[in-house]
Image (cartoon, rainbow, N blue to C red):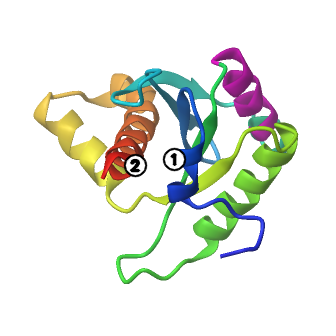
Amino acid sequence: MAESEVRLIDLRETKGRILGVDFGDTRTGLAVSDIGRFLASGIGYVSPGGIEKTAAAVADVAREHAVGAVVVGLPRNMDGSEGFRAERCRAFAALLSEKLGGSVPVAMIDERLSTVSASRYLNETNTRGKQRKQVIDTLSAQILLQNALDRLKN
């Protein structure tokens, strides 16, 4: 863990809503918690193109929702190791923190199986094609944020 990296447990010291981010090269899914940090709700996605523009767009959303913290999904392999995608997500989280001026902590959360869970749910609800593409990133962000909220409670 890098020295400047915020741990999920450190978010217990923050107040207010939390923004969940499922960073992707094409679409970045977003979810926000309620003020009591009980429930995550998907709020859509951004797709401005490029890591810099995406970090700026997500920072705007964080300010718009007046969040007290942000969690970004960290894609790990099933054995716990990290690959290129994890490096890219860490770089995104660092850029996002910079865009927020360091005033809002940005933590990483293991997102293993969040996309799998989202896919399973969409299969069960028979969501297919274009409609599926429009919701899978948001749903993944919602799942990873809910996992973070549940971990913060325990």
Whether residue 11 is visible, yes or no, is: yes
Q: CA distance from mark 2 to mark 1?
A: 7 Å
Side (left or right) of 10 relative to 31: right
Q: Secondary structure at mark 1?
A: helix
* Residue at image point 14% right, 28% down: 125
**Three-letter amino acid code of the residue under disc 2:** Leu
* Residue at image point 70% right, 64% down: 5
- Residue 43: percent from the left, percent from the top? 49, 20
75 versus 13 height, above or below = below
Farthest residue toward the front?
13
Whether residue 51 is visible, yes or no, is: no
Label 2 vs 1, first from the N-terminus: 1
Quarter containing the N terminus:
bottom right
- Residue 3: percent from the left, percent from the top? 76, 73
What numbered label is drawn on residue 12? Answer: 1
User: Do tag 2 and tag 1 residues touch (Cβ < 8 Å)?
Assistant: yes
Q: Quadrant of residue 129?
A: top left
Residue range of the region highlighted in magenta in the rendering = 55-65
**Three-letter amino acid code of the residue under disc 1:** Arg
Residue sitting nearer the eye, 77 or 12: 12
